[in-house]
Image (cartoon, rainbow, N blue to C red):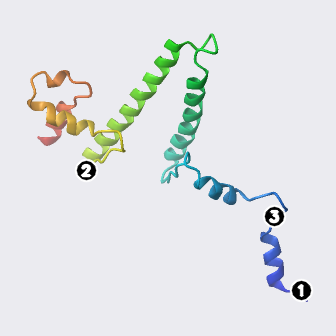
Amino acid sequence: MADKGTKTESAGKRASGKSSWQERKLEKVVRDDIDIISRKTRDQSDFISMLNTHDNVLYQLRMNMGRNRNLTFDKAQEFIERSLRIKEEINLLNAEMCQLMNWDYRPPRGFTNPLAVAEQGKGIKGASDLPGDHSEQINSSAA
């Protein structure tokens, strides 16, 4: 009768040179250009997929602008600025959802809480003209 332990051990081994997807993921973790993102919702999986694509496309855009006559510096700058606006919009969305649930919003490194900035600017003349000012939302939620 065959030893069951031997069968289990041999089943887990791969042919030389091949690694499982888990092993490949663990190898990537040690790279400094890889971040780990946990996902709790299906929406997050969509965001992760889009961000991976966006990261690659933005990198290629920066590397190839000026080399391809269709990819002018002005058009590349337009895309980069649009990407920055989208990041700020997601930051604002997160701040508004946290405010609705009475949570303290701690923005990621490099960002500020746009609602806290708007609240600080209430006493400044012309603060309503500041970009990203949401004092109306703050005032209506405080009432």
Residue drawn at (52%, 18%) of the image: 76
Spatial CA span between label 1 and label 3: 21 Å
Specify the amino acid type for callout 2: Asp
Numbered disc 3: secondary structure:
loop
Q: Earlier in the sequence, mark 1 or mark 2?
A: 1
Q: Earlier in the sequence, mark 3 or mark 2?
A: 3
Specify the amino acid type for callout 1: Ala
Nearer to us of marks 3 and 2 is: 3
Q: Residue under circle 3? A: 14
Instruction: Specify few, some or many for label 1: CA neighbours under 10 Å numbering under 14, 14-19, or 20 or more.
Output: few
Q: Residue under circle 2? A: 104
Numbered disc 2: secondary structure:
loop
Q: Earlier in the sequence, mark 1 or mark 3?
A: 1
Instruction: Specify few, some or many for label 2: CA neighbours under 10 Å numbering under 14, 14-19, or 20 or more.
Output: few
Q: Are marks 1 and 3 in contact (CB under 8 Å)?
A: no
Residue drawn at (52%, 14%) of the image: 73
Instruction: Report x, y in % for residue 84.
Output: 41, 28
Instruction: Report x, y in % for residue 28.
Output: 62, 52
Q: Tell me where residue 19 sits by quadrant.
A: bottom right
Q: Residue under circle 1? A: 2
Spatial CA span between label 3 and label 2: 48 Å
Q: Tell me where residue 5 sits by quadrant.
A: bottom right
Instruction: Report x, y in % for residue 25.
Output: 64, 55
Q: Tell me where residue 129 sits by quadrant.
A: top left
Instruction: Report x, y in % for residue 70.
Output: 61, 11
Could you tell whether 19 is left or right of 53 in the image? right
Please, which residue is most extreme toward the bottom here?
Answer: 1
Please, which residue is most extreme toward the top here?
Answer: 69
Residue drawn at (25%, 50%) of the image: 104
